[in-house]
Image (cartoon, grey):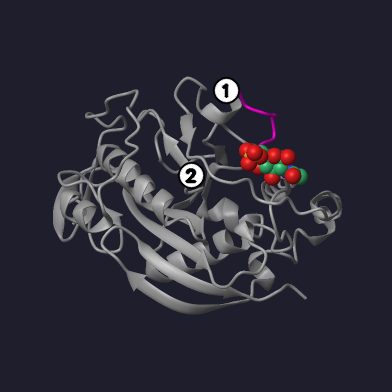
Amino acid sequence: FIPPLNKIIFNSTLQQRCPLIPPNLVGPLAILKNPPEMSVLETRLKDVNQGGRGNPKNCASRHRVAIIIPYRNRYEHLVTFLYNLHPVLLRQQIDYQIFVVEQEGTGQFNRAMLMNVGSVEALKERQFDCFIFHDVDLLPEDDRNLYTCPEQPRHMSVAVDKFRYRLPYADLFGGVSAMSREHFQMVNGFSNAFWGWGGEDDDMANRIKARGLYISRYPANIARYKMLSHQKEKANPKRYEVLRSGEKRFTTDGLKNLRYELIDKKKFKLYTWLLVRLAPMK
Ligand code: NGS
């Protein structure tokens, strides 16, 4: 039996594909800044399934997306993030799962490595089509900013309030960014060599260009974000050096030499939590 082109078989029933443009978007959003307690939020977001998964009810989503949050010590931000993001993703008819990848201990934070781990661990659960790497302190201000899988790597946090809604520089790839599974694997993921703040996203921008891909963006009037306030991280003084010598490591440093230990994993109602110990790169 071959189903008609616009339908697919889903849970052994024939389901219509979701429309290209989700019908219930609202456009500009009021950011919700005072979330209820997590337990209350869990009962309120009743369309979210265990592990922080969502899926449109009446159509088959076109996108299986793993949302990956590199994380440590920002519980209040996390609650606010979940409070704002789940309703948006549900309205966008994405088939998604939120992974919070927490770095164990107090050593230098390695954002890029946590995102590599997130991608590897997500694929152990399902064959996601793409990854959206998302800082926990950024909240989308418009639900037309679709969390779909991109043709080309997509930088999503184009206009952030903290930068007066201007893109600081053309190759910026930090904050929120989306990559297809194929492209992410093609560039060997992120570098594991950036310990402490800064540079890892610029290195990814270099990887993207080196492979003949390019950074795409939605218009700045839609790709808008609010940043939650926090103390500034101490920048890694070596980041420019590591960045400059990055190219010779593109094929070796990344998913290929990723070493970590998964210490714990739990499926909470609103997210899948991974606690990882990162092994320093040799
Ligand atoms: C650049 C950093 C990036 C960072 C970007 C935006 O200077 O990692 O600023 O920063 N590159 C280097 O340090 C080499 S932020 O928006 O977080 O203030 O993403």
Q: Which residues are magenta?
A: 165-172
Looking at the rendered structure, the kind of residue marked 2 is Asp
Element at badge 1? loop
Q: Quadrant of residue 13?
A: bottom left
Could you say where residue 183 lies in the image, as x and y percent from the top left? 58, 51
Query: Is 124 on the left or on the right of 79, as rendered?
Result: right
Callout 1: few (<14), some (14-19), or many (20+) C-alpha neighbours within 10 Å?
few
Q: Main secondary structure of the magenta part?
A: loop
Q: Nearer the viewer, residue 232 or 275?
A: 232
Q: Residue at x 35, y 32 (%)?
A: 31
Query: Is 137 on the left or on the right of 186, as rendered?
Result: left
Quadrant position of the N terminus in the picture: bottom left
Which residue position holds label 2?
A: 137
Q: Is residue 2 visible?
A: no
Which residue position holds label 1?
A: 164
Q: Which mark is residue 224?
A: none
Could you say where residue 209 lies in the image, as x and y percent from the top left? 72, 42
Q: Residue at x 32, y 27 (%)?
A: 30
Q: Is residue 248 visible?
A: yes
Most extreme residue toward the top is 221
